[in-house]
Structures are given as C-alpha cells and as structure tokens.
Amino acid sequence: MPAPFAVAEQTWVIPMTLPVGEDGVLPLNPVLIRGEQPVLADTGPAVLRGEFLDALFSLVDPGDLKWVFLSHDDRDHAGNLMELLDLCPAARLVTSSQGFMRLTKEWAFPAARVVLLGEGERLPIGDRQIRSSRPPLFDSPATRGLYDTRTGVYYGVDCFAALLPEYYQLAQDVPAGLYAAGFAWLNRANAPWYALTDPVRLGREVGRVRRLDPPVIVSYHGPPAYGMAGRLCDLLEAMPRDGDIQFPRLDELMGCLDAAR
C-alpha cells in the first residue's frame, strides 16, 4: 500500500490499489482533512481494512475524528464505515438523503450521529466549510463529492478517474497519451450512461467544475491532479460515445487478486 501524502494544507490522500485483471491497477483514494474538526471522505474497501486503518490512524487519533463524509454506499467507498464509527466515538456520518436511505437497508444508525447534506449545502467544520457537490459523472444516484472552501480541493468521487498500468502518485507524472486512454476507459466503464447523454447538457455539468477551477482535483479512482482542471474537463467532454469497453476475464481477475493477497 502506498504511503499517505499531502495534497493541500492539512489534507491527505490515503492511497490504495486493487488489480483490474491485466489491464492495470485501480486507485482508491480516501481523503482526510485534518483541520479543527477532522473529516474523512470515504472509508475504503473492507478487503484492505487493516492497511487502511493503520494509515488513517497514523494521521489522526480515532478519538479526534469528527466527521465521516460518505460519497455513496458502494462497497469500495463504504467498506469500513461501521468499523470507523465504532472506533471513532465522536465521529458523525455525513451523507446525502439517498445515500442514507440506501445504507439503512443494511445498517441502523442513531439519528444523533447522522447529518444529511443536500446538493450545494455546506457543513461548517471549524476552520473551514465543505460543500456537497454532485460530480459530472457518477455510478450511484446517491453520489455527492465535496469542495473544501479553504484549500480549493475538489473531491470528485468516481469522476475524473483513470485506470493505469501501474500506480502513479500524481496525474502530471503520467505520460499524456497513457493518461488520456486510462481516463477514457475508466470514466466510461464506471458511468456507461455517458454514451446516452446530450453533449450540451453534460457540458453544463462539466462547466460547473471548469468555472470552479480547483487547484487540485482528487478522484477516488485516479491520481490527484494539480492545476489540471481545464484539461480534465476537456478530456471528459471529448470521450467517445460509442465503441465497446473490453473488461477483464474472470481468470485474469482471479489471478491478479490472488497475487495481490
């Protein structure tokens, strides 16, 4: 597991990876904002629980974590949610109404430990605010990203992702052609409805990020990108809307997972 690294003031990515057949590695990037009221964005997959919790608690004491922002309930994002709420007694869950309703199909939560944050709403967390924002592409109706009003960090959840042949810490370290290909593959694979969208309507959604022009974009499934908001928005709008995506075979997936263990 790669070591956590800072992407902005008091803001760390806790990187993990999982193999995707022989096609490359899938990044998984929970984000910790360690301000006056520390907040963790997403909780990683259960299969990497031990490594993730060790890395997280090397940065923040369990008793100090105040907020767990859950973008949506997919297992690679919510896999360690309940363990974290048990280990961090002061932490409250922050998620969308849709996300909360989906979570309650499996788990029970005391109302005092839940905050629902709607699209565009802000949550004060001491020395800053985080704003809920749905990214242009997503794979769950519950998905909400966040924007840190102090540092300008934009957490795009599954949007702006890239499947690459090996781990890269930062997007600017990846050769341009390789990055563009991995970007087009993973964003289309994760949001197959993209092929059905009206380019003008999608362009308006992408334009929200373009106008924001965040200094750093963190995708849960791609290397963080500094000063690349315009380029990433261009890549998103330029992706092809036709052509099949070739997914790995079962034997490839199983072989890589066995090797990773």
Image (cartoon, rainbow, N blue to C red):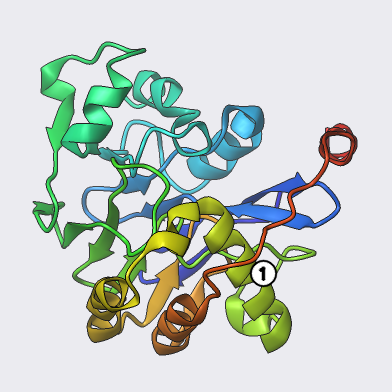
Q: Is residue 155 found left or right of 96 in the rendered image?
A: right
Q: Is residue 235 found left or right of 62 in the rendered image?
A: right
Q: Is residue 88 found left or right of 165 in the rendered image?
A: left
Q: Position of residue 166 (x, y in %)?
A: 78, 64
Q: Position of residue 186 (x, y in %)?
A: 60, 60
Instruction: Answer few, some or many: residues within 10 Å of disc 1's Cα (few below 14, many 20 plus, some between 14 and 19).
Output: some
Q: Nearer the viewer, residue 242 or 175?
A: 242
Residue 92 seen anywhere in this rendered image of the structure = no
Residue 111 seen anywhere in this rendered image of the structure = yes
Q: Is residue 121 above or below residue 92?
A: below
Q: Nearer the viewer, residue 20 or 167?
A: 20
> How many numbered dots are placed on residues in this image?
1
Q: Nearer the viewer, residue 9 or 235?
A: 235
Q: Residue at x 23, y 38 (%)?
A: 95
Name the residue that disc number 1 marks.
182
Quarter in which the C terminus is drawn: top right
Secondary structure, mark 1, is helix
Q: Is residue 135 found left or right of 164 in the rendered image?
A: left
For residue 120, what is the image quadrant?
A: bottom left
Q: Residue at x 22, y 48 (%)?
A: 37
Q: Position of residue 57 (x, y in %)?
A: 49, 39
For residue 5, what is the image quadrant?
A: bottom right
Q: Residue at x 74, y 55 (%)?
A: 246
Q: Is residue 114 above or below residue 57?
A: above
Which amino acid type corresponds to the residue marked 1 in the rendered image?
Gly
